[in-house]
Structure formats: C-alpha cells, structure tokens
Amino acid sequence: MRTVLSALSVLLAVVLTAAAVPSLWIERNVVDEDGFVRLLAPLSRDADFQAALGKSLTTTAVSASGVPAPLRPAATELAEKTLEGLTSDPAFPAAWESTLRESHRLNFSPATASTSAFTLELRPLADVVLDRLGAGLGVGFSDAPSITVPVGNAQQRAALTFAQDAAALALPLSAGAVLALLLGLLFARRRGTALAWAGGGLVVVAALLGAGTFLMASVASSQGSQGSVAGVFAQRAGQLLADAFGPWILGVAGAGAVFLIVGLVLAARQRRLPAPQ
C-alpha cells in the first residue's frame, strides 16, 4: 500500500505541476497589469509592428480627431511624415505604456468578458499623433476618442478567458503539487526511487510545455493578415510569450534533472540497505 500511495502521490504532483507552472506564469505575466506591460513593452521597439501601427493611426487619428475637412489632406500627408519618427518622440514611451495599460483594463475587465476578440486601445498613441500634427499645422486638436483595434478571434478570446480562470487556481495548484510530492516521499519505501520518478516526470512535463509553447508561437505567427496591426501584433506577441515562458520551462527541466540525479544516487545507496518493514 505504501508503494501504491507513493506512486499515486508522485504522479499527482507531476500532473499538478504541469498545470501549476503555466497557470502561475499567466497570473504573473498576463492577468497582472504590470506583468502584462513588461511582457509587451518590447513591441515599442519592433519595426514591423510600429510600421503597421503607423498605417492604422495615420487615417484613424485624423478622421477621429475632428480635423476640419479642408485640412484633412494636409493633415494626412503630415501624419504620414511625422509617424516615421513617432517612436523617437519623448512622449512615445509613456503613451505606449498607457496603451498597454488601457488595453489590459479593456480586455480583463468583467464587463468585457463577452467581447469576441482581444482589443488594443490606441487612444494614448493617437494623442501623440495629434499633438505632432497640431504642432505641424499650427492648430490645436482635442484629445482623441477611443480607438480600438481587434486582434485575434473568438477562439483566442475563449482561450484568454480560460487562462484567467486557470490563473486564479495558480497558488492552490502549486501548493497541491508540493504537498503531493511530500506525501509521495513520505509514503515511499525507498525515497530515492520516488524522488527519481518525480524528477523524470518533471523532465517530461518540461518537454511537453516546450512543445506546447512552440506550437502556440507557430500558430500565432500564422494569424492575421501580413502588415496589419492585428496580424503583426499576434505574431510578435506570440513570440514574446514563448520567449518569456522559456526560462520557466528550463526551471522545471532543471528541477527535474536535479531530482532525478539526487534520487538515483539515493536509490543506489538505499539498495545496499534492507527495505524498511
């Protein structure tokens, strides 16, 4: 019975770890607003994304700002020129952070849980564009209204909702994995063997998480139209998620390797001793 209980406990620990690691990562890097901002901050330096963003903002900001009709052709032409240096504008870093924060609140608020796709709120960036346009044309514009760009699809929105639910279980899953491992070692007749099996299981979990992450990044890279804000965002965001999750996968693999090696060493020593009755 001790062997059976130990095996079941170790197996439960491995399964719970497979669920706890991505849940905990999502809670800290996607559901948490500060983590979300840190995760997607590199997009502000991505040339392809900024080019796609500039095309969208050029016409959208001008039409949404209330620019008088006689000035719209000049404003559009000026916008195309000023957007080339948008990322060097002193106000751009703060505007991009505000864009990410407003987008996070828009998508993770309970009131928007039923929306069909993840949405970017571009209003803060549009304000920077209008300030540059106003300086170039010698006129003042009012603040830009809400400018949203859907990225992704309904299936991805459902996945995001599932991720939120999973993130809420991150700590219970983590605690359960640790407790199950401790129980597995406590029940084991030969603890070295049990620890080695747990380590091998963690290595397998790391391999599965790595394969799943690679698949997710590949799917994201094929989403959306080439050159569109939605398409480029999906591609770059998917890669950023995969890159950020990579160290966590290596951590699981490293912990598994340590458990495996230590367990094999202990098991070799324990074989020289009679099994406890």
Image (cartoon, grey):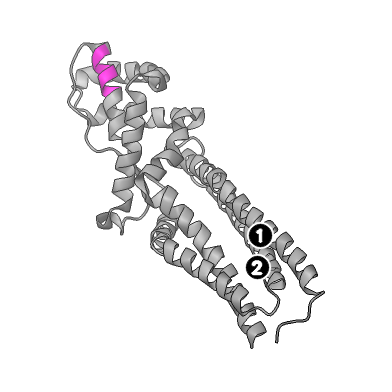
Q: Is residue 132 magenta?
A: yes
Q: Position of residue 174 (x, y in %)?
A: 48, 64
SS state under label 2 = helix
Q: Which residue is tagged 1?
A: 256
**Badge 2 vs badge 1, beta-carbon distance below 8 Å:** yes
Q: Residue at x 68, y 80 (%)?
A: 189
* Kind of residue at disc 1: Gly
Q: Is residue 258 above or below residue 124?
A: below
Q: Is residue 32 above or below residue 187?
A: above
Taking depth in this image into account, of 176 and 78 the one nearest to the observer is 176
Amino acid type, mark 2: Ala
Residue 47: in sight, yes or no?
yes
Residue 98, given in percent of the width and then of the height, sits at 31, 35
Residue 34: quarter of image: top left
Crowding at mark 1 (Cα within 10 Å: few <14, some 14-19, many 20+)? many
Q: Which residues are magenta?
A: 129-135
- For this view, does 226 lie left or right of residue 250? left
Is disc 1 placed on a helix, strand or loop?
Answer: helix
| Residue bearing the label numbered 2 | 198
